[in-house]
Image: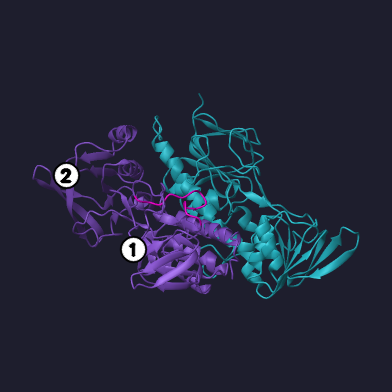
Chain colours: A cyan, B purple
Amino acid sequence: MKKTDYQMIIVGGGPAGLTAGLYAARGRLETVLIEKGATGGQVLVTDWVDNYPGFYDGIAGFELMEKMTAHVNRFDLEKKFATVASMNLQGEQKVITLESGEEVTGQTVIICTGAKPRKLGIPGEEELLGQGVSYCATCDGPFYRDQEIAVVGGGNTAIQEALHLTKFASKVTVIHRRDTLRATAILQEKAFAEEKIEFIWDAQVSEIIGNDEGVASLKIQHNDGTTSDLGVTGFFVLIGVAPNNEMLPLKQLETDAGGFIITDHEMCTKLPGVYAAGDIRSKNSRQIINAAGDGATAELSAEHYLSNMASPANP
Amino acid sequence: MKKTDYQMIIVGGGPAGLTAGLYAARGRLETVLIEKGATGGQVLVTDWVDNYPGFYDGIAGFELMEKMTAHVNRFDLEKKFATVASMNLQGEQKVITLESGEEVTGQTVIICTGAKPRKLGIPGEEELLGQGVSYCATCDGPFYRDQEIAVVGGGNTAIQEALHLTKFASKVTVIHRRDTLRATAILQEKAFAEEKIEFIWDAQVSEIIGNDEGVASLKIQHNDGTTSDLGVTGFFVLIGVAPNNEMLPLKQLETDAGGFIITDHEMCTKLPGVYAAGDIRSKNSRQIINAAGDGATAELSAEHYLSNMASPANP
């Protein structure tokens, strides 16, 4: 049998992976963190983070990730910048195959590959991200006090968040491509009763128009062929989240209907020695702080597994 | 029926409670956080925190808690400084009774009352806390590179942490009051095989002696009546953790054998509208970062519950 090279392999370098890496490096485990791009994950493109406890004036997303990266660097965490092609997580020795063909093997694996918001793919969406375009009402809602904003989506999340946004915004327009909502009845009732919420049915946003200050208006394409403009300063795209799971052995893991990995509250997957942390998990709330918390919990669960292995953890 | 005064009551102001409070205040829920002392919990008496991701040079415990407190203050979280006498968490309206007799009522409750390490109660223990006396090997182990240290305890945690500490310390002496360990066989085997670990059996530490630099030595009382001294610079007391649950309605909640509250991975207890976060939970790892993560998850679970209640969340 091939030598097991690492005690721990962390796949993904967002807040969950960096925190797992911090704990592993401080704990002096032979660890490697594999990241395909730059460490920081989705937070790198998050304009402003106002709810990571401790940074009380808020902090730019990339700056918070710089600090987290500096933190793991202080403890000399080994990093490998490469794209994972596939994994075999069954058995005692886990094998991660990189796109180059190289195999990285280890006794434990923590999956922190994250997720991404589903996007509309329309002009202005990418350019105005963080300048009025947002995928997270919990994160960015408070920035829109007394402003007029719009939400696209018709599911539970979209309607719950539209209701949430009425606490800040003076008006919330929900734009939905159908004439009925998918959200549960109770949420629909509340949304219909809420004076600040208006609906535009049977319509899609075709373009986001910006000015010097960010989002200025939306171009709306109605299903009857007409078009219209809606002036808003904020636009929340709440049409779902997709897991970064292309490289995962989905037949070996247990996932929910959306393809997210199911874990228990200690971040254990159904495979011994395999853990998941952060947005790739099946969970209700995806926040930086609970991704980081997941990372610490997963790492300590993995340490616990290593210390109880029959063969010495440190051969 | 009495008017429900708050949408959310958070009991306890450590990292879990402060983070739940941050999310609730940013979410503009009618919330009160009840704390019996100063906000910050156990971290207030933690000398140095080296593993809260983002503060990459480390930070003093009280300073991190000052920052977290400033964070919730920026969003005007209402706080009540009072001791909770009892709670009734059944039914839609939850009732928290303070020692003054005052009743605080709410639709949801997040329990963040924390835990405390079991202490030996010997001279020097309190005085040298953070100056060589520690209750957390994961937190403080890396501060003792190439030093001689001691651990008191004989359970799984003590022995697992003693093994962990050998990665840093040049010698780890385990002091145990009996002649056998309670830890599982595999951990015992590893500890006995580890050259850096020595045992002192049938003995208790009766005093911790300090000098200008912190802990200098331990006075050891052997069961045969003799005494001895052991020179160490670090002393880890790993004899267990106790929940702060005196004020909790333990018959209404589900707890583990140690009296910690059982939750699922969304921080839900078995009572609708009641959540637990941080060290009061039944869990394997109690860290600042995962307490904070728990707090965010619990608050968002409570928001979800409120938005799905039949009566409007904001009457």
Q: Residue furthest front?
A: B1
Residue B66 vertical placement versus B185 (above, below): below
Residue B30 screen position, x and y as percent:
53, 70
Q: Residue furthest top?
A: A1
What's the amino acid at mark 1? Val
Dot 2: element: strand
**In the image, what residue occupies the spot 28% across and 34% down?**
B192
**In the image, what residue occupies the spot 33% across and 70% down?**
B99
Q: Is residue B76 visible?
A: yes
Image side of residue A204 versus residue A117, left or right: right
Chain bearing tag 2 is B
Residue A8 screen position, x and y as percent:
49, 39
Magenta includes B265?
yes
Q: Quadrant of the C terminus of chain A?
A: top left
Dot 1: element: helix
Residue sitting nearer the eye, B302 or B155: B302
Kindly identify which residue carries mark 1: B45
What's the amino acid at mark 2? Ala
Residue A129 screen position, x and y as percent:
71, 62
Image side of residue B244 versus residue A56, left or right: left
Residue B27 figure quarter: bottom right
Kindly identify which residue carries mark 2: B203
Residue B166 figure quarter: top left
Q: Is residue A130 visible?
A: no
> Which callout, 1 or 2, points at the residue further toward the start of the chain?
1
Mark 2 closeness class: few <14, some 14–19, many ≥20 residues within 10 Å: many
| Region of the chain picked out in magenta, as a range | B259-272
Magenta includes B177?
no
Q: How far is the residue under mark 1 from the one under mark 2?
A: 28 Å
**In the image, what residue occupies the spot 51% across and 69% down?**
A56
